[in-house]
Image (cartoon, rainbow, N blue to C red):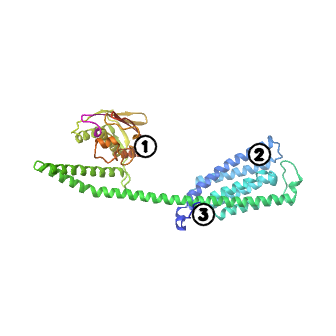
Amino acid sequence: MRNIVSPPPERRNILSSYTSPETLRDRSNWYIKLRWIAILIAGIFVFSGSHILNLHLHLTYLTWTLGLLLIFNIGYFLTNKKRRALDRIVELGILKFQMVMDLFFLTILMHLTGGVENPFSFFYFIHVVISSIIFKGKEVYQIAFLAIILFSLEVLGVQFGLLNHFHILSSSEHLHDPVYIYMALSVFCFVILFTAFLASNVTSRYRVIRDELIHKQKQLIVADQAKLDFFRYVAHEMKSPIVTIQSALDTVLSLYKESLNEKADDLLSRSRDRSQQVLDTVKDIVDMTQGTDEKPLQFAPCNVSLLIQNIRESLLDEYAIKQPNIDLRIPDDFEMKTYPELLDKIISNLLSNAIRYSDDNCQVILELIKNSHEMELIIVDFGIGISENEIPMIFDDFYRTAKAREKEKIGTGLGLAIVKRFIDKLGGSIFVNSTLNEGTTFTVKLPIHE
């Protein structure tokens, strides 16, 4: 079995939610809910025991006891509802008070329903288990010892005639036999202490594991943030030099293309293409980290129809050599609240891919359907398509299908990953339907915010 190493004390103090007033308040509210259930079950037992099983129960005393417990629980509930959890000591004290009062009420109920002859004395063990969840360390044993003291006082008080014994079945002689009484108390004490040991040990190990997981999670968050910071830094530092190199190559090719020999022209052209590939990768890295920097994205009204038309015009200029036909089937002046920057990237990437992986003079259809609570965006192309076994992987970072690599040598494999990430951020979904060598249909569904 692997050893579980407890985190250092200084880290444990920071990580463990036990010391948080808010967490203690949550446990208090949870405990109050359990008490509602316990009162209901106790009431059912009393009613059925008296009217169905014909047990000798003193309904007046039992009703008053359960009524007082109900009043106490209402008081706990209203106190938590009106008062904010600000102080750990106060919250812990209230929890201890609730547990102590519950043990007193349980002891009274046990006394009124037979005491040692009542088989429901195991409810004391349930209290000890609950205390191990709410408290820790010595406090669990304090609750266990209090349960032992209260039940022992009830049993011995009846044994020595200090308290009346309320029989629920019959006045059997063994119920007053000292040997039976002491044996019953000895077993009760042993089992309740063992329950305290076992429950506190299990919950203690759980808290150690939980704190380790919290610590690892924080380390992962820090590492992820460091990765994003590095990506942003690299993108920022690389973009300007690459653009400068690309501009220089374009200038040389433009001014001296006629005087260059074939080998030099090919070398410069391939260098220009490679620089464009690096620049595309830098842009994709910027898109991947969008929304994670300190500047928040703006959630604002967006004229989606106008946005799509602008994207269409931009792509027609970019891919003028391929002369694509982008058929828009959209409503006029459709507006919705969204993150315009993200929506722009989603539509641009999907339309750009549709053109890139289709032949010259291709047709691409973009249809926009407005439903009552969502916008449905359908982009259809008649290009290379995607094989069925590759569809589950197309949204993975840096993944490109075999057909895509064959069609376009240059590509980052980040476009669809960015699309999926942005759609998730907008609370939407994306579906793919494709047939190899026939075309692909992407369906994007995004919620409409009022």
Q: Which of pointers 2 and 1 lies earlier in the amino acid sequence? A: 2
* Residue numbers of the magenta segment: 355-365
Q: Amino acid at mark 1?
A: Gly
Rendered residue at 31%/35% (across/down): 383
Whole-number angstrom distance, CA of label 3 to CA of label 1:
41 Å
Q: Which residue is at the far front?
A: 263
Mark number, residue 46:
2
Q: Is residue 87 visible?
A: no
Whole-number angstrom distance, CA of label 3 to CA of label 2:
37 Å
Q: Nearer the viewer, mark 3 or mark 2?
A: 2
Q: Is residue 240 visible?
A: yes
> Camera-side residue: 441 or 150?
441
Q: Picture quarter containing residue 241?
A: bottom left
Q: Which SS class for mark 3?
A: helix
Rendered residue at 12%/50% (across/down): 261
Q: Which residue is mark 1?
A: 427
Mark number, residue 89:
3
Q: Amino acid at mark 3?
A: Ile
